[in-house]
Image: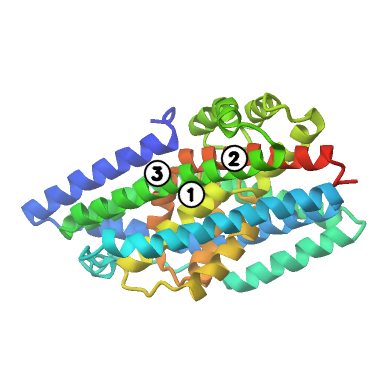
């Protein structure tokens, strides 16, 4: 089991949850579901406690690192990456608003599932600060570190980042399959799992379809600017795409991405600059996933979905995920604070978002990597035309 990747473990958790919930429903046995619900309550409380620390530990140094290297090249590349992320999220909202009500029509309300059985007991672990307080604090510290000469605070925050990342890697990620098994078992025991799985299957198809379409749009725009053949450019990037599917990490795919970008006649210094930067700040694929998945969860929970609520969420996603933990599912971990603070997600909703995101993380990461290649083509064209000094 230890050698298995996270996705296979999640799939095993889903299967175990399905079997256990169905069996307990059939024989009228409630205590195993209550036991799992007790674990889920404690895990959810721990997750809520850690969220503010995740925000400060990753957003603050991420903003500081961008600010320290301020230059025209960096500023333009960052602006293009952020704009791409916002466009991706906005397109996801438009598509979701048009199609999700039809796809999810008549399906189960998630609020009816959580009350099927009760936990044996609850352990409340209150967070040390609210989500918005953590965001404002992270921005203040990050901008402050970018504007002072000292390195002391930056080094402390980076050490704190390493601690938080270890907690995510050693505690949160290994326990996620059990947590997901508990959620699925609860759904199965409530007799609602078929409709929920059907709903999420439709959402997956929508997510991957939009990610693929957005990659094509990016290359049509980039190749129009650079006067190149978009089909050839996309073909040259396919090694990076399939590597990203395997690694589930933009950072781990950087060597292959650089080689693929160079095959598109991008200058080496541009490739060496844009690709690592894009791996950190350009998360269009994740934004599509998080936008559509959060809209689906909101609709299934009976919450209203409006542009007024979703657009600020999309804008903040582009900033908060700047320095997402460099692990599978890092994007959703960085967004948990926004889901709670801006969209009002509770423990079960956040857990479902983690499961939904991780289940398609390979494709989201591959979309991010392909987008980095398109940005590199644009930056290379602007550099050659001497629009940058």
Cα separation, mark 1 vs mark 3, equals: 16 Å
User: Which circle marks residue 359 in the picture?
Assistant: 3
Query: Which of the two residues, 346 or 94, is positioned nearer the viewer here?
Result: 94
Q: Residue at point 88% right, 61% down?
A: 147
Tag 3 secondary structure: helix
Rendered-image quadrant of the N terminus:
top left
Cα separation, mark 2 vs mark 1, equals: 37 Å
159 on left or right of 43: right
Q: Give the residue number, with chain letter if any, for mark 1.
A: 172
Q: Residues within 10 Å of mark 3 (few under 14, many from 20)?
A: some
Task: Tell me where residue 22 appears, x and y as whole percent.
Answer: 14, 49
Colour theme: rainbow
- The quadrant holding residue 64 is bottom right
- Mark sitting earlier along the chain (1/3): 1
Total labels: the figure holds 3
Of circles 1 and 3, the one toward us is 3
Q: Residues within 10 Å of mark 2 (few under 14, many from 20)?
A: many
Tag 1 secondary structure: helix
Callouts 3 and 2 close, C-beta under 8 Å: no
Q: Give the residue number, with chain letter if any, for mark 2.
A: 219
Task: Tell me where residue 16 appears, x and y as whole percent.
Answer: 25, 42
293 on left or right of 225: left
Query: Which of the two residues, 221 or 153, is positioned nearer the viewer here?
Result: 221
Q: Residue at point 13% right, 52% down?
A: 24
Q: Residue at point 53% right, 54% down?
A: 287
Of circles 2 and 1, the one toward us is 2
- The quadrant holding residue 150 is bottom right
């Amino acid at each position: 089991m230890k050698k298995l990747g996270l996705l296979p473990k999640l799939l095993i958790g889903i299967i175990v949850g399905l079997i256990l919930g169905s069996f307990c429903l059939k024989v009228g046995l409630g205590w195993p579901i209550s036991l799992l619900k007790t674990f889920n309550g404690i895990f959810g409380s721990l997750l809520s406690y850690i969220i503010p620390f995740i925000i400060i530990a990753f957003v603050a140094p991420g903003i500081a690192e961008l600010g320290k290297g301020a230059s025209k090249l960096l500023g333009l590349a960052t602006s293009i990456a952020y704009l791409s992320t916002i466009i991706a999220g906005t397109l996801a909202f438009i598509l979701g608003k048009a199609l999700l009500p039809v796809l999810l029509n008549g399906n189960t309300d998630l609020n009816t599932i959580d009350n099927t059985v009760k936990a044996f007991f609850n352990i409340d672990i209150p967070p040390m600060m609210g989500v918005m307080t953590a965001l404002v604090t992270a921005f203040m510290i990050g901008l402050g570190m970018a504007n002072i000469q000292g390195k002391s605070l930056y080094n402390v925050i980076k050490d704190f980042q390493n601690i938080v990342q270890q907690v995510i890697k050693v505690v949160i990620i290994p326990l996620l399959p059990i947590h997901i098994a508990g959620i699925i078992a609860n759904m199965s025991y409530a007799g609602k799992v078929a409709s929920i799985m059907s709903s999420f299957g439709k959402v997956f198809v929508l997510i991957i379809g939009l990610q693929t379409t957005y990659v094509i749009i990016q290359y049509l725009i980039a190749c129009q600017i650079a006067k190149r053949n978009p089909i050839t450019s996309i073909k040259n990037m396919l090694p990076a795409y399939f590597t990203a599917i395997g690694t589930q990490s933009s950072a781990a795919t950087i060597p292959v991405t650089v080689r693929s970008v160079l095959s598109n006649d991008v200058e080496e210094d541009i490739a060496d600059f844009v690709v690592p930067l894009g791996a950190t700040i350009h998360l269009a694929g994740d934004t599509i996933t998080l936008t559509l998945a959060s809209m689906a969860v909101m609709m299934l929970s009976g919450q209203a979905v409006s542009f007024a609520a979703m657009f600020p969420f999309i804008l903040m996603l582009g900033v908060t995920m700047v320095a997402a933990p460099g692990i599978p599912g890092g994007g959703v971990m960085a967004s948990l604070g926004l889901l709670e603070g801006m969209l009002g997600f509770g423990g079960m909703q956040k857990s479902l978002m983690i499961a939904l995101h991780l289940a398609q993380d390979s494709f989201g990461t591959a979309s991010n990597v392909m987008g980095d290649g398109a940005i590199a083509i644009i930056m290379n064209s602007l550099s050659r035309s001497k629009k940058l000094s």
